[in-house]
Image (tube, grey):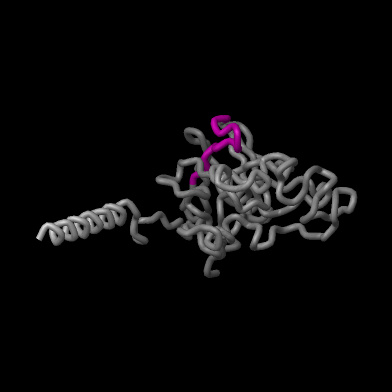
Amino acid sequence: MEKLRYICLILITCTLTIVQAQNKIPSTSERYVPKAIDLGLPSGTLWADRNMDINDKPSDFGTYYSWGSIIAHNEGQQVPMEERGFSWRTYKYGKGTKALTKYCTDSTFGTKDGKTQLDADDDAATAYAKNHAIPIWDAQWHIPTEKEFAELLEKCKWEWKKNGYQVTGPNGQSIFLPAAGFAGNNTSGCGCYWTSSLCPDFPCYAYAIMFDDSFIGWNNASRYLGYSIRPVRKGDR
């Protein structure tokens, strides 16, 4: 009888542990699924409602990535240093401005391959589902190209709000781009967002959008820097 009570106690304890563990893991319906916002752009491009990360609200900063890296800044402690980026010494595709190993249009800067757009495997948004147990972002998302960001700049109204821009499209729908700074300085009051497009004349740089409360413009940024990513996807048009 004593042995039977002991076995029952173990079974009850195990059952409670499993239930508690299940309660701590959100169900699929409770996990955040990025929303694709139709701004009424001529291309039909849909913009995500927030930066890459598991964010509670669109104004959250999200995480930072170097150009061509699929590992976020806040994941860096869990992977080898050489895979983290955020310096030329540790950058994935080159150890300096003259030592690029991929995405190089001029042999002066490294091994020339002529690539000017990120491959799907190097696009943090596209590759997210293949590298994370919870696929918050599926393979239909991608980092905006230079042309897609140019359209956002030219066709939308940008209005500075508290710590970011409300970007309103031709159809009146809008997204918010927070001034999330960059890796190592996330309280600078500026926004730094990668495109997926290389700067072909100087391949150690890639195109990015930068802004603060009085400026919005293009920047040729060193590829190792940790910037924000606002994914896009194709519309039905």
Q: Is residue 214 above or below residue 229?
A: above
Q: Quadrant of the N terminus?
A: bottom left
Residue 36 in view here: no
Q: Can you name the residue that lies furthest to the bottom here?
A: 236
Residue 180 lies in magenta, yes or no?
A: yes
In terms of secondary structure, what is the magenta stretch mainly? Answer: loop
**Quadrant of the rendered image containing residue 45:** bottom right
Q: Nearer the viewer, residue 183 or 38?
A: 183
Residue 160 in view here: yes
Q: Quadrant of the C terminus?
A: bottom right
Q: Is residue 47 above or below residue 90?
A: below
Relative placement, left or right, of 94 versus 60 is: right
**Quadrant of the rendered image containing residue 158:** top right
Residue 229 position within the rendered picture, expressed as x and y whole percent measured from the top left:
58, 48
Residue 85 lies in magenta, yes or no?
A: no
Residue 58 position within the rendered picture, expressed as x and y whole percent measured from the top left:
45, 45
Q: Nearer the viewer, residue 67 or 220?
A: 67
Q: Which residues are magenta?
A: 176-188
